[in-house]
C-alpha cells in the first residue's frame, strides 16, 4: 500500500508544472489600449477625415461632449475588461460600475439628441458607406480584445463581453464621428450605435464559449 502511495506521489510530482502568477491587469491592458488607439487612428486616417473635422472639434459643444463621453466609455471599458480577466481582482467591481455608468451617460445623451433633434436620416448610400467604415474600425480590435480576455481566467463571461463591446464601440464611435460627415441624430444612432449593439448581443450569446477556460 505504501509503495502505491509513493508511486502516486511520484507521478503527481512528475506531472507538476510550475504556474506563473498573473501580471497586474494594468500591465496587460495598457499595451492593448495603446495598440487599439493606434489602430483606430490609422484606420480613421485611411478612411479620410471629414472636411469640417477641425470646426467640429473646436466649435461644436455637442460633438465635444460626444467624443469625451465615448473616450471615457472606451478607456474605462477596456480597464474593466482587463480587470475581469483575473477572478476576484481588487477594484474589479469599481471599474465595471464606472464603465456601466459612463455607458449609460453616453446612451442618455444620444437619446436626448434623438428627442430634441428628431429622428432624421441620411441617404441609403451614406448608411452603407458608414456601416462599412464601422466594420473596418471595429472588427480587428474586437478579435484582439477577445483573444486577450480568453488568455485570462474570467469568471464573468457576460460582463467580459459587455465591457469588451463598450471598449471597442467607444473608440469606433470616435473614428466614425471624425470620418462620417453626417450629424443627423437618427443617422448617427443607426449607423454608429446599432452595429455595436448587435456586436454586444452576439458576444453575449456566445460569451460562455468565448471566455471559457
Image (cartoon, rainbow, N blue to C red):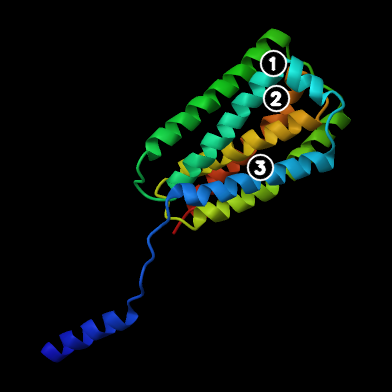
Vertical comparison of 150 with 47: above or below: below
Q: CA gap, disc 2 to disc 1? A: 14 Å
> Where does label 2 land, which residue?
189
| 106 on left or right of 10 | right
Give me the disc on residue 62: 1
Using the rendered view, name the quadrant where residue 65 is placed.
top right
Indicate the secondary structure of the residue bearing disc 2: helix
Indicate the secondary structure of the residue bearing disc 3: helix
Q: Is residue 144 visible?
A: yes
For image coordinates 83% across by 43% down, the residue present is: 46
| 198 on left or right of 60 | left
The x and y percentages for residue 35 are 64, 48
> Where does label 3 land, which residue?
37
Within-10-Å neighbours for mark 2: few <14, some 14–19, many 20+: some
The x and y percentages for residue 156 are 42, 45
The x and y percentages for residue 139 are 69, 47
Q: CA gap, disc 2 to disc 3? A: 23 Å
Vertical comparison of 200 with 120: above or below: below
Q: Are marks 2 and 3 in contact (CB under 8 Å)?
A: no
Q: Are marks 2 and 1 in contact (CB under 8 Å)?
A: no
Instruction: Give the camera-side residue of 87 and 8.
Output: 87
Say which of marks 1 and 3 sits in front. Answer: 3
| 46 on left or right of 88 | right
Q: Is residue 157 visible?
A: no
Say which of marks 2 and 1 sits in front. Answer: 1
For image coordinates 56% across by 36% down, the residue present is: 75
Amino acid at each position: 500500500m505504501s509503495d502505491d502511495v509513493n508511486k502516486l506521489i511520484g507521478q503527481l510530482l512528475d506531472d507538476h508544472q510550475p504556474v506563473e502568477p498573473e501580471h497586474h491587469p494594468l500591465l496587460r491592458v495598457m499595451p492593448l489600449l495603446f495598440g487599439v488607439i493606434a489602430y483606430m487612428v490609422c484606420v480613421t486616417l485611411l478612411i479620410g477625415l471629414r472636411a469640417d473635422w477641425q470646426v467640429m472639434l473646436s466649435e461644436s459643444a455637442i460633438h465635444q461632449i460626444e467624443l469625451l463621453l465615448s473616450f471615457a466609455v472606451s478607456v474605462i471599458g477596456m480597464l474593466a475588461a482587463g480587470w475581469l480577466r483575473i477572478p476576484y481582482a481588487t477594484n474589479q467591481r469599481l471599474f465595471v460600475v464606472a464603465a456601466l455608468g459612463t455607458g449609460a451617460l453616453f446612451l442618455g445623451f444620444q437619446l436626448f439628441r434623438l428627442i430634441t433633434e428628431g429622428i432624421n436620416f441620411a441617404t441609403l448610400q451614406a448608411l452603407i458607406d458608414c456601416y462599412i467604415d464601422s466594420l473596418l474600425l471595429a472588427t480587428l480590435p474586437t478579435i484582439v480584445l477577445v483573444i486577450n480576455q480568453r488568455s485570462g481566467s474570467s469568471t464573468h463571461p457576460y460582463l467580459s463581453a459587455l465591457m469588451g463591446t463598450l471598449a471597442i464601440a467607444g473608440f469606433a464611435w470616435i473614428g466614425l464621428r471624425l470620418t462620417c460627415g453626417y450629424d443627423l441624430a437618427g443617422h448617427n444612432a443607426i449607423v454608429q450605435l446599432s452595429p455595436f449593439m448587435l456586436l454586444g448581443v452576439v458576444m453575449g450569446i456566445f460569451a460562455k464559449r468565448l471566455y471559457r477556460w
